[in-house]
């Protein structure tokens, strides 16, 4: 306690202002991610975005029956399996990769939610609740070749700027490191680019870890295959 006394009243005010300006932490991130995967998860790659009441993220309480109650699992799955591969809901958006062209290419699920239209599904969701808790989840980390490199042809990095002005708790989460990018220095650098715009986490069966602390990237978020 002695270490706090020296700040005085002004110090406490400054600390309070700094903490609120940067946005509250998503305290129960593992509960949220488990619910999203168990309720809306599908086979293969997919991405989901939510914008819910901030109280769901700032307390450690279990999620109640009202959490995402307007976005039924069947409706979400139908949308993600439709020709457009997108679900636009009340508090949730979701996407699966969408085939395009005649050479077997696919628009990635993250790109569909963040960039493929103007405004994007995620931007429209953020507009509904300015101070809500928003979590963007992708099963596999956004790939270096297409999505997560700022200069990539279908990069999502600039689109992540939409989260900068969002006042509520927020997190960008992935479960698996895309196997082609495991241990790559480029992926490590791209994590830092995401972190500049929205806190980035890896949540897997072991729990959730914030990928960046004092500009140092946690190896659990990068892997070591190519180092």
Image (tube, helix red, strand yellow):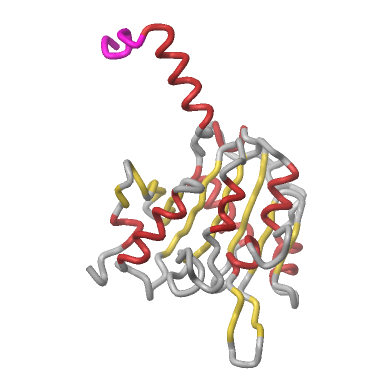
Q: Farthest bottom residue?
A: 102
Q: Please identify the quadrant where the N terminus is shown.
A: top left
Measuring from the top left, give residue 74's x and y in whole percent: 73, 63
Relative depth, front residue between 80 and 169: 169
Which residue corresponds to the image point at 67% horizontal and 42% vertical from the top-left? 52
Q: Is residue 3 magenta?
A: yes
Measuring from the top left, give residue 8's x and y in whole percent: 37, 7
Measuring from the top left, give residue 196's x and y in whole percent: 45, 48
28 versus 123 height, above or below:
above
Q: Please identify the quadrant where the C terminus is shown.
A: bottom left
180 versus 186 height, above or below:
below
Q: How many marks?
A: 0
Left or right: 2 in relation to 139: left
Which residue corresponds to the image point at 25% horizontal and 72% vertical from the top-left? 226
Q: Which residues are magenta?
A: 1-7
Q: Is residue 42 magenta?
A: no
Where residue 42 sits, quadrant-wise, is bottom right
Which residue corresponds to the image point at 54% horizontal and 31% vertical from the top-left? 59
Relative depth, front residue between 140 and 158: 158
Left or right: 145 in relation to 125: left
Which residue corresponds to the image point at 28% horizontal and 56% vertical from the top-left? 219
Left or right: 115 in relation to 197: right
Measuring from the top left, give residue 201's x and y in whole percent: 43, 50
Left or right: 148 in relation to 125: left
């Amino acid at each position: 306690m002695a270490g706090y006394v020296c700040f005085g009243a002004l110090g406490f005010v400054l600390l309070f202002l700094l903490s609120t300006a940067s946005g509250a932490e998503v305290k129960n991130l593992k509960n949220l991610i488990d619910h999203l995967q168990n309720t809306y998860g599908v086979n293969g790659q997919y991405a989901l975005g939510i914008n819910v009441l901030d109280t769901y993220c700032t307390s450690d309480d279990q999620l109640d029956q009202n959490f995402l109650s307007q976005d039924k699992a069947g409706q979400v799955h139908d949308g993600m399996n439709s020709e457009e591969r997108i679900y636009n809901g009340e508090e949730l958006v979701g996407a699966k990769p969408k085939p395009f062209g005649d050479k077997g290419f696919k628009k990635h699920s993250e790109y569909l939610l963040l960039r493929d239209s103007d405004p994007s599904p995620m931007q429209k969701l953020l507009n509904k609740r300015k101070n809500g808790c928003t979590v963007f989840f992708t099963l596999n980390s956004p790939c270096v070749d297409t999505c997560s490199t700022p200069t990539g042809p279908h990069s999502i990095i600039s689109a992540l700027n939409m989260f900068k002005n969002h006042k509520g708790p927020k997190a960008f989460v992935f479960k698996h490191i895309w196997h082609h990018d495991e241990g790559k220095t480029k992926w490590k650098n791209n994590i830092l680019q995401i972190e500049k715009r929205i806190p980035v986490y890896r949540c897997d069966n072991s729990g959730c870890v914030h990928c960046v602390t004092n500009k140092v990237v946690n190896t659990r978020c990068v892997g070591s295959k190519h180092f």
